[in-house]
Image: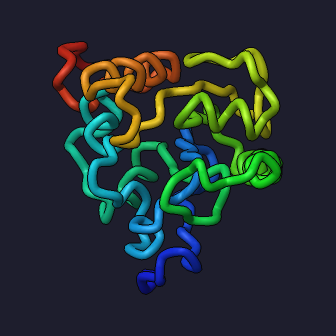
């Protein structure tokens, strides 16, 4: 286990393995997450609740539980590895370089789906100014691509219920059964 870093200079480790069903890619780590050494550790981030409410996980995980995702065929990474207080602190060049780096990482592990957390980050990283939420017509590193809303607490456009619905659309498309029991889909 990695010792927590000091924030801006910390590198947040990926939660990745070969053959995953879905890899979730945030824009970049927040300073709190990088310092803690765990993805989506920032207070107010709604990633973990959305993952559970949408049926990806059987319970609401804490950031410290992130490695459990691998057992369910899920992973976590980011487009840009440099932590910042806000994604707006990233330059267009950093996002484009991060997009190329992410494509290589995805190519190496071969997941079925890449779920990018945030349409604005996707547009900048992959030169797709017209991209919208949902499935994309292209692949990245050989993986099908789906854009879900950014789960940051700063994204007021998507309240928790709407965020969970968008995540559930991806889960259904990826053929992953409802592990939460919250949606009443029954066993698959």
Q: Position of residue 186 (x, y in %)?
A: 22, 16
Q: Is residue 120 left or right of residue 46?
A: right
Q: How many marks?
A: 0
Looking at the image, which residue is at 40% across and 60% down?
A: 67
Q: Nearer the viewer, residue 50 or 80?
A: 80
Does the image show residue 177? no
Image quarter hosting the C terminus: top left
Is residue 172 visible in the rendered image? The answer is yes
**Residue 24 in the image: above or below residue 158:** below
Question: Is the N terminus in the top left, top right, bottom left or bottom right quadrant?
Answer: bottom left
Q: Position of residue 16 (x, y in %)?
A: 57, 56
Residue 123 percent across, percent down from the top left: 71, 30
Q: How is the image coloured?
A: rainbow
In the displayed structure, would residue 11 be above or below residue 84? Answer: below
Q: Residue at x 38, y 73 (%)?
A: 36
Question: Is residue 134 found left or right of 187 in the rendered image?
Answer: right
Q: Residue at x 33, y 41 (%)?
A: 153
Give the percent coordinates (x, y) of residue 131.
69, 19
Relative side of 133 to 41, left or right: right
Which residue shows up at 76% across the image and 54% down it? Answer: 94
């Amino acid at each position: 286990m990695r010792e927590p870093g000091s924030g801006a200079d910390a590198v947040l480790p990926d939660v990745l393995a070969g053959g995953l069903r879905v890899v979730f890619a945030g824009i970049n780590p927040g300073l709190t997450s990088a310092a803690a050494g765990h993805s989506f550790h920032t207070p107010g981030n709604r990633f973990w609740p959305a993952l559970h409410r949408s049926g990806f996980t059987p319970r609401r995980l804490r950031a410290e539980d992130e490695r459990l995702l691998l057992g369910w065929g899920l992973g976590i990474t980011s487009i840009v590895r440099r932590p910042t207080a806000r994604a707006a602190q990233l330059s267009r060049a950093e996002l484009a370089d991060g997009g190329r780096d992410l494509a290589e990482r995805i190519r190496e592990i071969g997941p079925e789906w890449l779920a990018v957390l945030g349409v604005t980050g996707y547009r900048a990283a992959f030169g797709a100014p017209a991209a919208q939420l949902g499935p994309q017509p292209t692949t990245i590193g050989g993986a099908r691509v789906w854009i879900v809303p950014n789960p940051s607490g700063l994204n007021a456009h998507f309240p928790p219920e709407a965020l969970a619905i968008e995540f559930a659309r991806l889960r259904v498309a990826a053929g992953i059964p409802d592990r939460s029991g919250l949606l009443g889909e029954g066993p698959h």
